[in-house]
Amino acid sequence: MKLHTLASLCIAAALAACASPRGNALDGASGEPRLRVAQAAVASGNLQLGESIYASVSAAAPSDTDVQLGYADVLVRLNKFHQAHSVLSDHLKTVKSPQLLCGPLGAIDVIQGEAARAIKEFDTAIAADHGNMRWVVDKAIALDMLSRHADAQGLYSQALAAEPDDVITINNLALSLALSGQKTEATSIASSLAGRSDLPERVTLTYDVLRAADGENISTVRDTMGPGNYEHVLQLAKAIGGTEK
């Protein structure tokens, strides 16, 4: 399906940050020396060493929620999404706070294209933490992947009511509107971010997508994009173009 492919490209280009199940996963974990070594290894970029240590500690502390989140986080950083998902799902019945694993599980499901399964995980996470807009936004992404754009846009609006200046949510709303054929509204929202100096690359890419969808030649910015991004932008623009209602 074209829209499913388009939404998947949006995830890759605009929401890579959702890959990490939880920042600072060691906060509140036990003070075992191996955890401190693992944390130091990850912080220094030695993800393979961090993975090795976390695997050992995960097996030794199956009830420790933070340990399992930390282990999954390292695996995600290594693009081992299936293994990260298994670590979290296998410990749902052993950790002290299983609801904390559901949001990260949903985020990994999104990356793997399992949108329907992701929505169930996000619903559990949101029920446990109503104020966590991250899971609301990630659920909206899953809805977009299923072409349920009106439902997704309602969630983006909910998140923006709580955090009106969140550029990622604004960006996602613009993409969702474009996916549903509302290019004019999408361009207007994306344009509202123009001139800001704090925009992540995935947000500026969205604006380039909309410009290209309107027929503008964006080849002049090709060299400023990361590897593969230019091709993704053109694919998105081609899919969006001609869908105006």
Image (cartoon, helix red, strand yellow):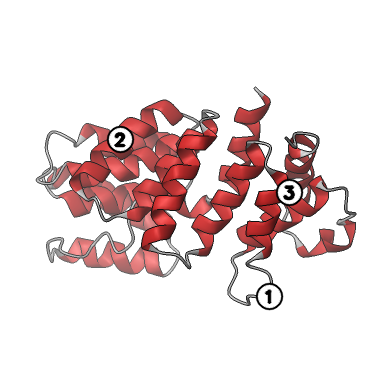
Quarter of the image where one finds residue 199: bottom right
Left or right: 46 in relation to 236: left
How far apart are the alpha carbons under marks 1 and 3? 25 Å
How far apart are the alpha carbons under marks 2 and 3? 31 Å
Q: Residue at x 75, y 60 (%)?
A: 225
Under mark 1, the amino acid is Gly
Element type at mark 3: loop
- Residue under pointer 1: 195
Residue 80 visible? The answer is no
**Is the residue under label 3 in contact with that under label 1 (CB below 8 Å)?**
no
151 up-or-down from 159: above or below: above
- Viewer-proximal residue, 4 or 194? 194
Left or right: 195 in relation to 49: right
Q: Residue at x 37, y 33 (%)?
A: 119
Quarter of the image with the N terminus is top right
Element type at mark 1: loop
* Label disc, if present, on residue 121 of the rendered structure: 2
Q: Is tag 2's residue or tag 3's residue first in the polypeptide sequence?
A: 2
Residue 2 visible? The answer is yes
| Dot 1 crowding, Cα within 10 Å, few <14, some 14–19, many 20+ | few
Left or right: 85 in relation to 13: left
- Give the percent coordinates (x, y) of residue 165: 48, 68
- Residue under pointer 3: 228
